[in-house]
Image (cartoon, rainbow, N blue to C red):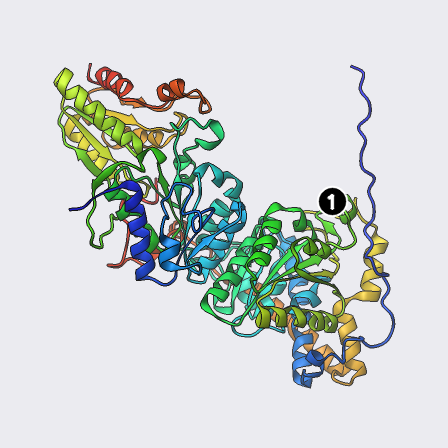
Amino acid sequence: MDSKPTTVAKSVAFTHPESLKRPAGPSEFAQHPVNVALTKEEKIALYTKMVRIRHFEQRCIRTYQQGKIGGFLHLYVGQEAVAAGTISLLGKNDHVITGYRDHGHGLMVGMSMNECMAELTGKITGCSQGKGGSMHYFAPDKNYWGGHGIVGGQAPLGTGLAYALKYRGLKGCCLTYMGDGAVNQGAVHEAYNLAALWDLPVIFVIENNGYSMGTSQERSSAHPGCLAKRAEGYGIAWDVINGHDVYEVRAKTSEAVKRAHEKSKPTVLEIFTYRYFGHSMADPDKTYRDKEEIKTYRETKDPVFLFEKELLLAKVLTKDLVESINQAAMEEADAAAAFADESPDPTVADITKHIYWEEDNRGPQTTSRGTIIFE
Amino acid sequence: MPVISYREALRAAMREELKRDENVVIMGEEVAQFNGAYKVTEGLLKEFGPKRIVDTPISEAGFIGLGIGASMLGIRPVMELMFWSFSYVAFDQIVNNAGNIRYMSGGLIHCPIVIRGPANGGTNVGATHSHTPEAILASHPGIKVVCPATPYDAKGLLKAAIRDNDPVYVMENTILYNDKGEVPDEDYIVPIGVADIKREGSDLTIVAHGRAVITSLKAAEILEKEHGVSVEVVDLRSIRPLDEETILASVRKTHRALLVEENKPFCGVDAQVAYLIQARAFDDLDAPIGRVSSIDAPQIYCKRMEDLQLPHPARVVEAALKVLA
């Protein structure tokens, strides 16, 4: 049979719309009121949280390589300033929901490394008792609603959380995170439309790390370069943010939070960030991007290192303090790995628990009977 | 007792629950200003206002997902799908999000959402608008599915669904909307997962749900009048949970079973019911289990043929006589 060779789209390396190199000197957003308002202790705490995310994730790599973590493991290393900057602004009626790269957000809302690590190894002491795994962290007591595995599927849920806040008359918002790959999903556009139509206090945060799995933005998204701008089609306010600068993330996100709280209006934020490891641990990361690109980002724009430098210059941190914070985070992550190791598995009987509320809460109020779990 | 239509019974259920619980919200395409594509929600906007009765854009994945998110924070959305056939564009939300969130969170979150609307063929609208997805959805642990056949059950099951703390999918039938029956004015629920003997008999058990119950009752009349056969009709009412004991008790009494449903045969609800009967009442059976379902093809448009594609009394009678032979 006479056949023509199939045309394969040329692999185009992703480049952020701004230069890969960050200008030297302190963040131009250090003097923004939300950052000026931070006490020395709060700045140290913010830095500490970013360091904890990094060391937790790096400890996960070891645990994964030891064969103790199954399924998919999507790491947040490189993206720390996004979760840290945005979530550090939230109050008691503000909520968080994200996709499958959810560890950083979990640690930021206050989940413990122990419950997070034990979930990864499928133990009963995990946040979801070993039923969710890496992609499905939940902590509703901390306003954290997951942890969702299907790209973009959480966007309508976050919009619904915002709807519930408005319905109840609460002054709050829902930060609804997604990756750059999610912006092409229909559910995201449907969520945008509803959020704008009904003036819902939802903030869609596109964590743009440049690659939807192994497909660069140029190969996945029409009119790349500014995914947030798609919000204009819905009359939603939008902004772009350098995700390596936690002060910039806080400054610009605070405007969106204000818009949600005071006007009950949505915002789309696109935060340029970068992941140092593959899409997941199953991605050998050898085919779609240049090692040099990772190296350049790490050396010039690492969000943890830049914030550390900023705080050292401002004499908020000292070298000794940096070392002790890092040391403590590493020890905490090691202890979490040990905790996960020592924790028991769920039992066979646990497989059929937590399917229905009524099954777990038997009482006179039940609305159903009959066989609900089948043999 | 007042006699009202199936449609009015559904509306009464929503009105009573809207009054009882301020967290109940009715949402869907054309439910408010248009008064409902099938007039089920007629008058509710006028009575309860636009905060409680909400028109949505044609955006099932968006608004169903929104309802699921809102339910996690304690809102009790009753979402209308103009047709259950449209659920397919919202499948990720309906199955993955609503159905799994309780499990994947280790019981930390629950999702008290109701999705309701018609799921039936027989209306001359072609294959895309004639799906009956109760078997597909009930095959997912975490989800409850009910299919009321009468006005009484429609009101009682919908009220139970709204009070339930898990996702309950209520599959109605446009052909039944005008059917009338006795429905109490006062508050009552029909517990989810309890079957109902719609007709008592001793020679044959017919198990059915939804409109197939009405078809089976008509067939039972014919069987009695023309063939002297006493037929018991078990209305499942709920697919998941399933009232296995009522099915088994009836089969143990009559020793013969015929299963009737409007689904296509492959992997239908009755495949599960047939398995149940052979597994737990094998020795009680005097004949192989019989089955009537829709003819296995996408729903045909031609009205004359569609009426024959769906189970109808003559086909049920014929199948019953085979089981009785």
Q: Give the residue drawn at x 33%, y 28%.
A: B261
Give the number of callouts: 1
Instruction: Answer left or right for B40 relative to A6.
Output: left
Q: Nearer the viewer, residue B168 or A368?
A: B168
Q: Is residue B214 above or below residue A336?
A: above
Q: Nearer the viewer, residue A85 or B25?
A: B25
Q: Give the residue drawn at x 18%, y 20%.
A: B222
Q: Give the residue drawn at x 74%, y 65%.
A: A243
Q: Is residue A36 above or below residue A351?
A: below
> Of helix, strand and loop, which one carries label 1?
helix
Residue denoted by label 1: A220
Q: Nearer the viewer, residue A172 or B167?
A: A172
Which quarter of the figure is the C terminus of chain B placed in?
top left
Q: Nearer the viewer, residue B217 or A328?
A: B217
Residue A173, percent from left and from top: 56, 67
What is the chain identity of the residue bearing mark 1? Answer: A
Quadrant for residue A374, please give it: top left
Decide: few, some or many residues near mark 1? Use Cα within 10 Å; few <14, some 14-19, many ≥20: some
Is residue B321 at all visible to an observer of this figure? yes
Amino acid carrying label 1: it is: Ser
Instruction: Answer left or right for A154 relative to B210.
Output: right
Is residue A340 at all visible to an observer of this figure? no
Q: Is residue A324 above or below residue B80?
A: below
Residue B183, percent from left and from top: 21, 45
Residue A220, percent from left and from top: 74, 44
